[in-house]
Image (cartoon, rainbow, N blue to C red):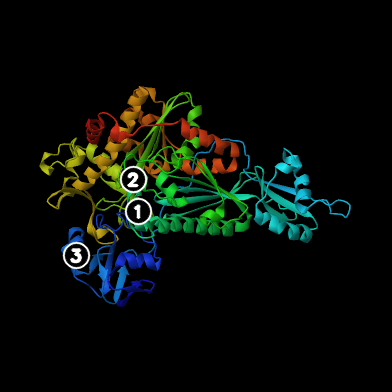
Amino acid sequence: MKEVRIVFQPGEISVPVIAGTTIMEAMNRSGLGEDFPCGGRGKCGKCRVKVREGLEDFTAIDEDHLTAQELAEGIRLACATKINRDMIIEMQSPKKLQHHILIDSAERAFHIQPHLLKVFAEIAQPSLSEHKSDWQRLQESLAGLGGSAGDLQAPLSVLRRLPDTLRESANRVTTVVYGSQVLGIEQGDTTGTLLGMAFDIGTTTIVGYLLDLNSGRELEVVSTLNPQAQYGGDVISRITFAGKEEQGLDTLHQAVTGAMNRLIGEAVDKAGVSRNQLYGISVAANTTMHHLFLGITPRTIGMSPYVSAVNQGLVVAPEELGLEINQAGRVFVLPNIAGFVGADTTAVLLAADLEKRDQVTLILDIGTNGEIVLGSQDRMVACSAAAGPAFEGAQITSGMRGAEGAIDHISFDHGLSYTVIGNGLPIGICGSALLDGVAGLVELGMINKRGKFLEPEKLTHPRALKLKDRLIKYEETWAFQLVEAGQTRHGRPILITQNDIRELQLAKGAIAAGVKILQEAMGIECDDIKEVLLAGAFGNYLNPHSACVIGLIPRELESRIKTIGNAAGNGAKIALLSAQEFSRAKDLAGEVSFVELGSYPGFNTIFAQNTYFKLD
């Protein structure tokens, strides 16, 4: 087979590949860490690169997404372009984008109760008159933990180290105990150091919190984009990749565990401690990410009746997952609720104390897959709404994630104004800005209830008339020009197109239908809902007024909306710091009734009705 070489600029990263390899595959192999929102299926048009040398004819997929001028300049889509000779590629975003990853959350009080104990003991010396084994003498010294000395057990790995450890430490040792198991033995008194990390593994991002398990103190917070994104931007893409690609499941499993190991390294370096001082990890993740983290196929989640392989909370040895912490530690995986309502939702419920609230509360974690929970201490119901990628900026003409260069908020109060993450020239819009933009167009009467742009001559609102020149033709339909080409970093205009509005309608319709159906399941009206809690990054950054204007959230609830930040991460921290709370999480997941929207009577009608905009 012919071997060719591709060079990525800037950085002069050179990668040998077999002829016929796509640029996307070469980018993945090079470790550039780029993501492909549609999984490389040629649907989003986001993977633009510029071919400096070795240019090939453009493909039909290129032609669908790129202008004639871009094609002439050598712009190609990395997922569609094959490398048949030596090639030099100029990355279209040479400066690595700084993504804004939500790490903060609302805190609540709870009792710290570590899962693992470190117990210091001075072991009696052996003698000719007392022929007790090393293990017997250690058991007796630990008998005060409860139960008889004989109840304690140890794996063979600990027993192998026991003789040397005792004698090298003058019989002064610290044992790491989990339940009735002695998982580790260390020289001297190391009881003062018991650390762990709580992880929130999202489809888009991974956040890790380094914690002192004795005091509960947060030492460091680290985060990264989920590297699985290079194999698909949503859970369905990853389920498909895991099932159809050779070694696909293992690839996705190693991608997430590798990222976690890197975050662990970053956190301990910042805190001035070592990996070996970490004894616990907790994980909250949606059901697909949960399975991929564990190396369990998520295939059944993606097909009717959409069931998971396992829902129960799990306790796993770190070596089984390839996690680089003290091997006497344990990994605590929170339980899932259903196929598309995962352990991240369980963590949110744990953080929000929903089952202890006497008033009905609505909890929304909005993303590509929206998880919705409605209830109180009397009853809790949940559903999963397939919102699609609009809220993440994927499949939106000028869409992008919440990173440097993204327009994150838009205002029409005094003309048109917007803010840009990083304060430089914009390169696109993220989901929160899309909400603001469409909400403004609704309020100004520039689109009708079906989401269709009005022609400029039909506008009547005084502020809309001042903006009518921003209505331009795009692919034979109207579009709203937010930013002219000369005012962007890449020299292309930033638009809200007719298709973008339709994508948002589908997304908001799915979430709104889910809320409506849970209300029906509970037999309540909007007036009965006393508080709305928005969890997750998108919920934290969106403008509640915009969300209510477009009908994502019922307008009656606008004054009752409260953001609670990364509640899934907070729940993961609580579950790691308290064995009692982890046990409670396992019970909590079983108390939630799941409603499958697709099989709910009248779902299609409810969904269609909620795609419309309500005009004043």
- Residue 243 vs 555, above or below: the answer is below
- Residue 325 vs 500, above or below: the answer is below
- Judged from the image, the secondary structure of the residue bearing numbered disc 1 is helix
Q: Which residue is mark 3?
A: 59
- Judged from the image, the secondary structure of the residue bearing numbered disc 3 is loop
Count the numbered circles shown.
3
Q: Label 1 amino acid? A: Gly
- Judged from the image, the secondary structure of the residue bearing numbered disc 2 is helix
Q: Label 3 amino acid? A: Thr
Q: Label 2 amino acid? A: Gly
Q: Foreground residue, 250 or 535?
A: 250
Tell me, yes or no, whether the two marked residues, 3 and 1, touch with CB atoms within 8 Å.
no
Q: Which mark is residue 530?
A: none
- Residue 206's x, y, as percent? 45, 51
Q: Quadrant of the C terminus?
A: top left
Tell me, yes or no, whether the two marked residues, 2 and 1, touch with CB atoms within 8 Å.
yes
- Residue 264's x, y, as percent? 54, 56
Q: Which residue is mark 2?
A: 302
The alpha-carbon separation of the residues under discs 2 and 1 comes to 10 Å
Mark sitting earlier along the chain (2/1): 1
The answer to whether any part of residue 355 appears in the image is yes
Q: Residue at x 35, y 71 (%)?
A: 9
Q: Which mark is residue 243?
A: 1
Mark sitting earlier along the chain (2/3): 3
